[in-house]
Image (cartoon, helix red, strand yellow):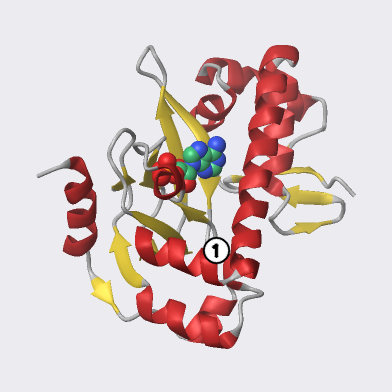
Amino acid sequence: MSASDREVDKVSMAQSQKPDAISSLRAIPMFASVSTEALESIASLLIERSFPKHKTIVEEGAPGDYMYIIVEGRVKVTKLSGDGREKILELLDVGDFFGEMSLFDEAPRSASVKGLSDVRILALARKDFLRLLARSPDLALSVIQELTRRLRQVDEQASSLSFQRVKERTMGLLVRLAREEQGQEGRRRTPVLTHQQIADMIGTSRETVTRAIKGLKSDGWLEQDGKHYLVPAED
Ligand code: CMP
């Protein structure tokens, strides 16, 4: 069995349910401006699957035949570095998609994607995804916009790795992750993050992150709110 078959097999072994209704598809940013008619045909192509926490949904290096949209839970996108350490490229949440790159260029999976919680996703096969993009310019544009956002972020990370110290990199990461979260009184909450996860995202050690977090708290820049951090709102 090829690696690609295994990925598909993981999907088919997982619990299967009927796709969500049109209204819940409409709540997914990627489909926000797609016509109801197009959504109806998309709904019939999506396969809903569930994965337990920590399960690898996509494996770096394997061939890929599906892309996925998250409807419940959170995942991390990771890449193994030369010395075998796991670098977290991104955390993805409800409404985000992944697994599209291999469908576009037919190269192996660029990264692994694993559940940080139990995860429910909608899977879309390559031929259906490409056909939908060709038929729906709105859908194609929203995918391009998200890929542009990711490229900008990679650019930012590359420059912050070379020019900024760990404290600034930690601040930049926390502000970015808090951007889409709730806030009050001039502060925003980050998602729940361990020091190790922060270290894996900014390319340093857990101990260094612990020191940076301690410094940011004593500077008054960072506050703790249970398992979340509170950072200054940007606006
Ligand atoms: P694919 O290469 O098919 O499988 C791994 C997926 O991880 C990839 O498609 C993207 O969907 C996702 N991915 C890879 N790099 C990043 C990144 N820097 N930010 C967000 N998602 C990514």
Q: Left or right: 66 with respect to 13?
A: right
Q: Is residue 124 above or below residue 77?
A: below
Identity of the amino acid at label 1? Answer: Gly
According to the image, label 1 marks what residue? 95
Q: Residues within 10 Å of mark 1 (few under 14, many from 20)?
A: some
Q: Indicate the quadrant where residue 27 lies.
A: bottom right
Q: Can see residue 20?
A: no
User: Can you give x and y, in whole percent of width and height, for residue 198 in the image?
Assistant: 56, 30
Q: Can see residue 228?
A: yes
Nearer to us in this view, 43 or 69: 43
Nearer to us in this view, 74 or 123: 123
- Residue at the spot 37% in from the left edge and 72% down from the top edge: 46
Question: On the rendered image, what quadrant is the N terminus found in?
Answer: top left
User: Can you give x and y, in whole percent of width and height, for residue 172 in the image?
Assistant: 73, 32
User: Can you give x and y, in whole percent of width and height, for residue 44 in the image?
Assistant: 37, 81
- Residue at the spot 45% in from the left edge and 61% down from the top edge: 130
- Residue at the spot 82% in from the left edge and 25% down from the top edge: 219
- Residue at the spot 42% in from the left edge and 29% down from the top edge: 79
Q: Is residue 212 above or below residue 93?
A: above
Q: Left or right: 218 with respect to 227?
A: right
Q: Is residue 36 above or below residue 203?
A: below
Q: Indicate the quadrant where residue 230 lies.
A: top right
Residue farthest right in this picture: 235
Nearer to us in this view, 31 or 202: 31
